[in-house]
Amino acid sequence: MERIGLIDIKDLRKIYSMGKVDVHALRGIDLKIEKGEFVALMGPSGSGKSTLLNMIGLLDTPTSGGIVVDGIDVSFLNDNQRADFRLKKMGFVFQFFSLLMELNSLENVALPMIMDERKYDRASLLLELVGIGDRADHYPSELSGGQQQRVAIARALANEPAILLADEPTANLDTESSNQIVELFRELNGNGQTIIMVTHEHELGEKADRIIRIKDGRVV
Amino acid sequence: MKAWLFLAFKDLSKRRRETLMIILAITIGVVGPLFTTALNNGMQDAFVGNTVNVYTGHLQIQPNTGDTVISKSESVLSKVTGIQGIVGAAPRMNGGVEIESRTEKMGIAIFGVKPSLEEKASTLAKTVERGDFLDDKDKNDLLIGTSLSEVMKVDVGDTVLLQYQNREPVEFKIKGIISTGTFELDRYAIIGTYDTVKELIEKDDASNIIIRLENPDESLKYKLILQKETTLPNIKTWQELSAGMAGMIETFGVISTMTSGVSVFVAAIAISLIIYTTVRNKIREIGVLKAIGARGEMIMRIYLAEAIFIGVIGTSLGTIIGLFLIHGMQQNPLIMTPEYGMKLIIMPRISLGSILAADLSILLTCIIGGIYPAIIAARTNIIKAIWSG
């Protein structure tokens, strides 16, 4: 199957100023990710993999270099444009269970659709898709870690994002739940969903189409 | 529903207990200023109203500068009573005498009044608590205030001796006990008929003429009319005559407003602190919201909406409870006897303007209190927020 370029990163650099010391988190990353790919970003702690994911997800801004996502050079977007871009094009799954505690599962999943002023009929379908349709009216405090992460994945898929970004999504889960989550990612990817996942677990990384290894802020 | 409204509503309903507590604080913050303002107005009405109704009149014609009496007061009176809008006018004569009962003796002011004219010019006749009001034909009969009657240990039917300077004491009988709600007439003066007092204190003519208007608010207009008609320049309005007392009560009002201001300020600080604490506690959630596409302005709207919601509910509740209390007290006015049984009936009163001013200032304070934490939330750095907690 012919794949279309979705993310094009050129000479991406990120320097954090920590007082008098500059920390080079990314030292010139060049990377292309195609539509429909399932990519695992792997590397030791402090290698820059999460920083790279934050740059791709427009959560942080690079010091220099360019990122083109879905044909748009996102380096030049202002804060509001970046927020809108994240809402419409990105889906995030974080390491911790990032649900809003005052909302039940259905409302958590519906939130991006409400924010985008869309109908949120799909929310219950998405909960079915991630296998917890029967927990729609449960609040996060009433769900296990694995279930919360499934709700987070359903929420990430709410606005049919171009890219699903997952930062160590199984770090706080037991082995069984971790395997289920990765299987879910595989299923989603099988349906054409582009996924970029940060992980330091080889077993999980190997389930991706491609592993990109990062070390000292560079692709190795 | 807009996402910010949805999230604000959800957040408030999740933190129901804190929300109710802060609403209660605002409610108290509203009830306080409303009630104290109404009470202050009622006190002003009681003091100034009583004084004007029985003592100063709406307008008072006073002697020309340097004179102690109004010469040809009868002629002045006849000119005044013909003017449309004037309900009544009555001459009064003032002086000082010594009063002696069986047990007490003291110096006191004495007022001479014409009872038939007083019935239209003042409400003096309606202030009789025991006994009767004076009659034009009465001689050596007196009205005495409740407070003074207690001090002198006299009641209706008792006799007292009145002595003017070194003249022979004259015996007077207490015909009625009055309760005017003014210190001047209840505690420091006695009232007899005009001609009797005129004879007792040897005055030639009226000390002043009090005038009652159909519309007290037109006092200034009638002052000018009377100055023209009577050619007497020294005419005072009730506002001028009661300015000292009104000023004193206004001072109390300022103090109560300042106290209310403190309670409003405390309410604002409480709102600000609670929302700020919420923002700090929810910093990760705010980070997540921004990560999934919430703009800074949307985050700000959530917390501002919460402050406004709390403010509106608290202000509305406070207004309803405040008005309910004021209404209840209007049905059962506060009767006060500040000194020796002098009776003051205090009926709280509040204007729409005062209600709006109190409500708007508290609402505005709530919004201002919510702005700072809302800005903090909106400016939250996504990465730091997500990795906090």
Image: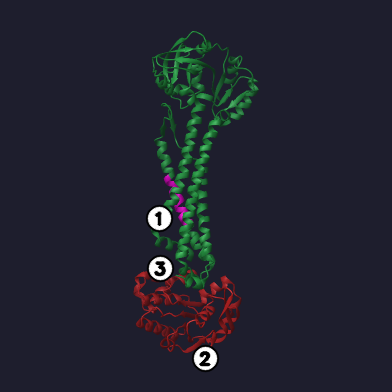
Chain colours: A red, B green
Q: Name the amino acid, label 3.
A: Met
Q: Residue at x 42, y 23 (%)?
A: B146
Q: Is residue B279 above or below residue B160?
A: below
Mark 2 residue crowding within 10 angstroms, few (<14) / some (14–19) / many (20+): few
Q: Residue placed at 53% from the left, 68% from the top?
A: B295
Q: Please check the rendered image and state whether residue B279 is part of the magenta-colored stretch, yes or no.
A: no
Q: Chain of mark 2?
A: A
Dot 2 lies on which element? Answer: loop
Q: Identify which residue, B65 or A92, lies in the foreground.
A: B65
Letter of the chain that mark 1 sits on in the rendering: B
Labels 2 and 1 in the same subunit? no
Look at discs 2 and 3 and give the one toward the viewer: 3
Tag 2 and tag 3 share a subunit: yes
Residue A2 circle label: 2
| Amino acid type assigned to the residue bearing label 1 in the image | Leu
Q: Which residues are magenta?
A: B308-321
- Tag 1 secondary structure: helix
Question: Of the numbered discs in the image, which one, if any, rests on residue A182?
Answer: none
Q: CA distance from mark 2 to mark 3?
A: 42 Å
Say which residue label 1 marks.
B20
- Label 3, secondary structure: give it: loop
Residue bearing the label numbered 3: A101
Q: Position of residue B330 (x, y in %)?
A: 42, 37
Q: Residue type at mark 2?
A: Glu
**In this view, B218 is above or below B260:** above
Image quadrant assignment for residue B155 = top left
Is residue B313 magenta-colored? yes
Q: Nearer the viewer, residue B23 or A96?
A: A96
Q: Establish if B65 lies above or below A209.
A: above
Instruction: Give coordinates of residue A25: x percent, y percent.
Output: 55, 80
Residue A215 placed where, x, y %? 52, 86
